[in-house]
Image (cartoon, grey):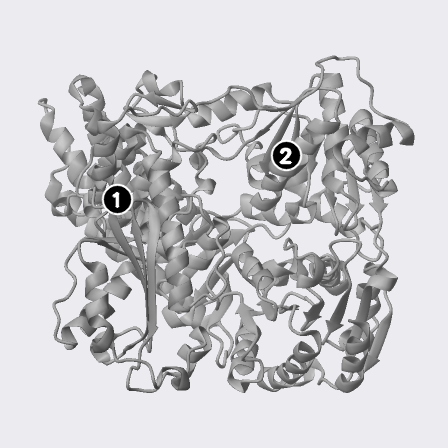
Amino acid sequence: MLNKFVVVDLETTGNNPKKGDKIIQFAAVVIEDGKITESFSSLINPKRSIPAFIEELTGLEDGMVKDAPLFMEIAPKVIALLEGAYFVAHNVLFDLSFLQEELIQAGFEGFYGSVLDTVEMARIIFPTADGYKLSDLAFREDLNHDRPHQADSDAQVTAELFLILVNRLSQLPKMTLRQLSQLSGGLKSDLQQLIDEIILEIDQSTETWDETLEMYNTLALKKFASSPTSTSGQNDEHFHYPISEEDKIDMVTKGFSSYEKRMGQFQMMDGVYEAFMSGKHTLIEAGTGVGKSLAYLLPVAYFAKQNKLRVIVSTHTIQLQEQLIHNEIPLLAKILPLEVKTVLLKGRNHYISLEKFALSLLEENDNYDTTLTKMQILVWLTETKTGDRDELNLSSGGNLFWNKIKNEQTIFAMNKVWQEKDFYLRAKNEAYQADIIITNHSLLLSNLSAETSFLPDFDYAIIDEGHHFEKVASQYFGRSLDYLSTRLLLSQFGQYDQHLLFYELDSIVESIKSKKENVTPPEKINKLTSDLSYEMDEFFKLTALYAKSNSAERRGLNRAKVRFSHDKGGKEKNALVHSAERFAFLLKDLQTVITARLNVIKENNNSLSSRHKGKLEEIISFRNDLEDLRNTVQDCFIKESNDVKWIEVDFRSQQNITTFYAQPAFVAASLKEKFFNCKKGIVLTSATLTVNHSFDYMIKEIGLSKDTTLTMSISSPFDYQSQVQLLIPEDLPEINATSLDDYVIAITEHIITIAEATKGRMLILFTAHDMLKKTYELIKESGFLNDYAIIAQGITSGSRSRLTRNFQRYDKAILLGTSSFWEGIDIPGEDLSCLIMVRLPFSPPDEPLTEAKCQVIKQKGGNAFTEYSLPEAVLRFKQGFGRLIRTEKDRGIMMVFDKRIITTKYGKAFLQSIPSVPMKKGNIDELVEIIDKWL
């Protein structure tokens, strides 16, 4: 085995050596025989000035490199280090291309040995990591990375990471390593060479077998202990629910080293238990800090056991599901004297089909993304107990590959051998044996129709994050159609000579010798697919054109939501509807052609190879997707319906970012008839169900009746009077009386002043992305907050949870967020000291669903503002407020820039819906003084 690895990191003046960018710092760490044996680093004089953004990133400035050696002076040392070694770097092509250029310019040979990339290795070996930046991986592996973006620190951390990766690689079973080796010829680095050397070493010694793994057919899998997550305890039907306070305290203290009694939590336990025992639907609002997860899980466990019934617990976010499975259920296990089986259940497509994956390994000619994803999955199968794709961190190309191996109904590939290990069947069987099934709102609703039903029957459920239930139901009863997914779907079939699904289907038909008179010739299908592709492009162009010609004057705004109506839009509307009709007909024609060929194959399927069976499953899945697409087009444009229809478009890239939606304006009647009337006891809970202390709005929205629904409101145990100060600046303009640009200038000045007073640690909530973007740009442009990390949703890359983690990582950080940041993010302690709401969170009156709801209310003689717009805004305001105080020790400032909260009558509805807190008004200087004293 080549035993020498040199881990290199460079800092440079830019990212293009061909355009004159230069190295300003070189660092290398040498690894021999699995140990770090030498380190070398040097600053380098680039003979040009260091750009400001590089200085900001690396902390290196002109003065520090002016007396440093030129690269040519250290080049001999660099060459000596690299001799006979693997060249290793984090994103190797960047460092290698720079080094080659500098070596050649200095008159030396470049480096032409083997290279390894720790980004590529980490993606394969840590397939479930949150991110693959060096700082993310250092954090994950608990490596000390004290000076990111300085070459010596980065090289040291990369070397330590590399040793961990090689160690993990050499622990994989030989079968998996052989499969990885076969695939790794398609990578950017020489990982194949390293893997082959590891296999050789294993061959020369005896392979130590990992007891937790098993070889199954052609795959190494994690062994599975069959039974749902069960909480320990004796299995006895005679346990009684702990009615008294003493009994509850005795029980709950078993789970905590120090337990403070929460009366609200006990109150909620009794509320949930009584709701199920009396068979009544119930709404429970539980303030932050009540401990509501345990407050419903404990009574649910008793109720399920006593009555031998299963209970569903449904959440809106994956985050909460994971919290329940990893934190709350183990806690329940500690405190319960009875055994409770819990299982997490997701939709079928979330689970991998091992058979399809094994068949996919027989295919060749993969692109880079597919190769990498196959390698990630081979490693993941040695770790996963669930086979759930949410565990994986896949690229967009990886997500495409997942569609080929996701679990779904199969017709040809039905090898019974794989069924024993099928993750989906396992999850489903566990669900039938479980007492508590944790799932999400969409899956809960899919139970309403028999064809899509996936959950076992149930009569009792907890709906947590219940304020989302109405919105999810609206999406469930609706349809959507977007350009990118439609194009991706249709491109899978391809023209005959593109060797995609069409070619595969035809090759299988050709290989079956039988009468083939009744199948359409390939040339005709080629014409059909090109007509379909043309009509699809035309359809989305006309969709964007309709949006453009029907959207109001939008100066400087790139995104629009435009309502679609059959009654208006003139020639643009007619052209769009005709195109939709043609599109639907062509989809039907393609479906018919595919079905005819599949029927020929079904009649002669005795001689099909495994590879053919795998391909046929892909083709059937494609045909089913075509049918869904056609139904969506018909529902949106051809069939009569009362749905609200609208188009969302980004005019900068209108064809790529165009989506058509159709949703019912109100789902109360459907939920009442298809859900609540069929169930015995449903408990909805959330921290935000009431408006001004009344449940009426929520009861009406979801289709319950006031007379038969129980309600309970449990306030937060936190002392908001001493934990929060609410400040309202009086020197900002009225939001509706000034232009967007002027308002942004005014609030940006305030934000800069406040940030300096709070030292960052600030979350700023916006209601529209355009205002967020303009504010972010102005803050950056001002230069006043250059030493702050400014993180903005939709601008800084990453998911909501990654942006939140980054925010917590920096001492002086400011996080700007829109819609999804108003709730569901949890930043306890000193990481968040100041929350700013830029405006009260009313939905724009021309937002299609809002507009439609308001129209219906007016037609019925109601007041749309008080019956819909205001309550909806108040609930979001309460959600936003809930971000600030997450524990009894937190303290924080909340600022509302929108003066309507104190200048209008309806402002009281917002203030009365949050806990009572001290409120102060004043100009910015007076408020900063309060902040200084208080924080």
Residue 586 visible at all = no
- Residue at screen point 41% across, 43% down: 631
- Residue at screen point 76% across, 81% down: 928
- C-alpha distance separating marks 2 and 1: 45 Å
Q: Position of residue 678 (x, y in %)?
A: 68, 29
- Does 925 appear above or below 295? below
**Closer-to-camera residue (620/566):** 620
- Residue at screen point 38% across, 27% down: 221
Q: Position of residue 384 (x, y in %)?
A: 44, 33
Q: Are marks 2 and 1 in contact (CB under 8 Å)?
A: no
Residue reaching furthest front? 37
Q: Which residue is mark 2?
A: 674
10 Å crowding of disc 2: few (<14), some (14-19), many (20+): some
Q: Which residue is mark 1?
A: 371
As helix, strand or loop, the secondary structure at mark 2 comes to helix
Q: Position of residue 615 (x, y in %)?
A: 23, 33
Q: Position of residue 760 (x, y in %)?
A: 64, 72
**Closer-to-camera residue (522/732):** 732
- Lateral position of residue 406 relative to residue 557, left or right: left
- Residue at screen point 37% across, 35% down: 406
**Closer-to-camera residue (702/580):** 702
Instruction: Identify residue type, mark 2.
Output: Lys
Instruction: Identify residue type, mark 1.
Output: Thr
As helix, strand or loop, the secondary structure at mark 1 comes to helix
Viewport quadrant of the C terminus: bottom right
Q: Earlier in the sequence, mark 2 or mark 1?
A: 1
Q: Which quarter of the figure has residue 808? A: bottom right
